Image (cartoon, grey):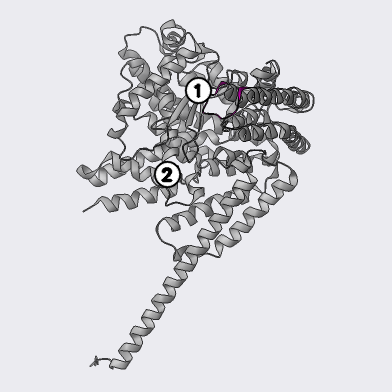
Amino acid sequence: MLMITRPHRLHWRGWLCAALLGLAATLAQAASASRELQRLFDEHWRWQMRHQPEWASSLGVVEAGERWDDHSPAALDAADAHERQLMQRLQRIKPQQLRGEERLSWEIFHHDLALAIEQQRHPVLRTLVLSGVAGPHLALSGVLQDMPMTSEADARRVLARLAAWPARVDQDLALARDGLKRGWVSHRASLQRLLDQLDGQLALPPRQQPAFEPMARLLAAGPEVMVTPARREALAAEAEALIVQRIAPALRTLRRAVAEELLPAAPANGSLSLRPGGAEVYRLLVREQTTTDLNPTQIHAIGLGEVQRLRAEMDALRASTGFAGDFDAFVRFLYTDPRFFHRSAEALLDGYRSLAKRVDPALPRLFATLPRQPYGIRAIPPDQGAGMADNYSGGSPDNSRPGWFNTNVVALDQRPIWQMEALFLHETVPGHHLQGARAQELTQLPEWRRHAWHVAYGEGWALYAEGLGESLGLYQDPYSRFGRLSYEAWRAARLVVDTGIHALGWSREQAIDYISGCCGMGREEMAAEVDRYIAWPAQALGYKLGQMRILALREQARQALGERFDIRRFHQAVLDHGSVPLPVLERIVADWIRSQRP
């Protein structure tokens, strides 16, 4: 018979002491892991603000405003070494000793670092720095237009940056020439778009060039800017002289090198699969941009299925309008009837501002918490050409600079009114601006997480936001509803075209034919888009895959919670952890569902 005896009191006390000591040791280890993780994050953030001055100045780091990112081989090698050192330190911190957001932060940081270190095995990725979507000429306008201009000190920082810009051109040309030696050159059509952009800048008078934009703001500013009119003109004259003496010659140097060295060697087919080691590089980029383990063939099949589904909805909507012709005839009608187009750039901008006034008051229907940061709408500099895509640039964390929806006002015949509602929702609210501005307010997160970016999450959210339009009072006519469907079909077609080009042997013309024929978009616009997918492999995959995952998670939550499901709280759960890889988002939503159950 098993005898169960009562433990001696001293033995019981000894056991309790041992348990308490063990608990204390565990808590001490957890506290140590937490402190070390925070130290690592803080040090890395300071490193980023020192070594990525273009980004840092956009976040309001004043001392970064005189410099450009360093693209020299020594600086790039140092950045690679920094990432490897971070990984060594991160792996010494045991994630099992972390809880809550700290555990998530460890996982996200590890995910991002691992991909960055894997990319180091492919140094050719450094060399594709010149195209129609990338290059120092675009950084020149993109960085300067976000610099503050409220004092003479601000103006001096702009002048210092202008003086330093030719060195940035030299560094990027050196990288592109290294790529040329390795058999990696941007494809022909993309380089031709770059040349067109350079020609557009060089054709402008100095005071109309993008490099002069900050000084134009200074000259136009009111008395709140404490710089006398005489000093403003003197500073503007200095900027004009720098544009003539340094910026324009560097632009001409860049143009000559692209035209004479890179373009003759540029492939007509920009598929990564045709480059040395390109297939492996593409698979890596697919994992990075989608944060999934889906392979190109799987993604291609998903895209085909979604295009077929959406095309059926578009055909049904066309029929509901009473239009007598087929799909192609309907699209031609939408792109040629004058009623569907604004007659001036200002009218287009006013149209977007009117949408803002309609949407902003409706947001509380879908969101429990809204960010405080304002946003504005402005034209993309015309010299960037008709092919430059509309985009969003985030505001500063202190809200001194708003977020900006940058819209292309060139070639108004390519910018129909029936697309405007979907595009507005994507770029501003509840899309990029709402998501990004809300992330900046999450002060419980480390700085890097407040400004993190994962394409599948960020672009997936923005595409998901397009689908919220009816709940916000938009899409009230069949043409704007067709616009929403065509935008979603366009993102689905990207899954087909991007993988088709870079993994399945598609030509540029084949891709343009497919995407312009299936989703109700203009051929010229889609040609520019295809050139973007060739120049920026796999980036276009994140939109649709991210949106599909968010929709699936919403349906999962709705099914699990029934009447307890609250769309406002669901959106808060998705947004209030910042940008995360999709597998992490799945766990976040699963935890939220459990927390909502009685």
Residue that label 1 marks = 378
User: Does dot 2 land on a helix, a strand or a loop?
Assistant: loop
Q: Position of residue 429 (x, y in %)?
A: 39, 31
The quadrant where residue 269 appears: top right
Q: Which callout, 1 or 2, points at the residue further toward the start of the chain?
A: 1
Q: Residue at x 52, y 52 (%)?
A: 111
Q: State whether the magenta stretch is mostly helix, strand or loop.
A: loop
Q: Which mark is residue 470?
A: none
> Residue at coordinates 31% horizontally, 28% vertically from top-left?
361
Q: CA distance from mark 1 to mark 2?
A: 24 Å
Q: Position of residue 549 (x, y in %)?
A: 40, 40
User: Where are the magenta residues, as a range?
Assistant: 220-229
Coordinates of residue 98 in the picture (x, y in percent): 44, 63
- Location of the N terminus (image quadrant): bottom left
Q: Secondary structure under badge 1?
A: strand
Which numbered marker is on residue 441?
2
The structure residue drawn at horizontal position 41% and vertical position 35%, both measured from the top left corner, is 434
Residue at 56 percent of width and 36 percent of height? 538
Compare residues 319 and 546 and report the one nearer the observer.
Answer: 546
Tags 1 and 2 touching, CB below 8 Å: no
| Direction from residue 522 to residue 182 in the image, left or right | right
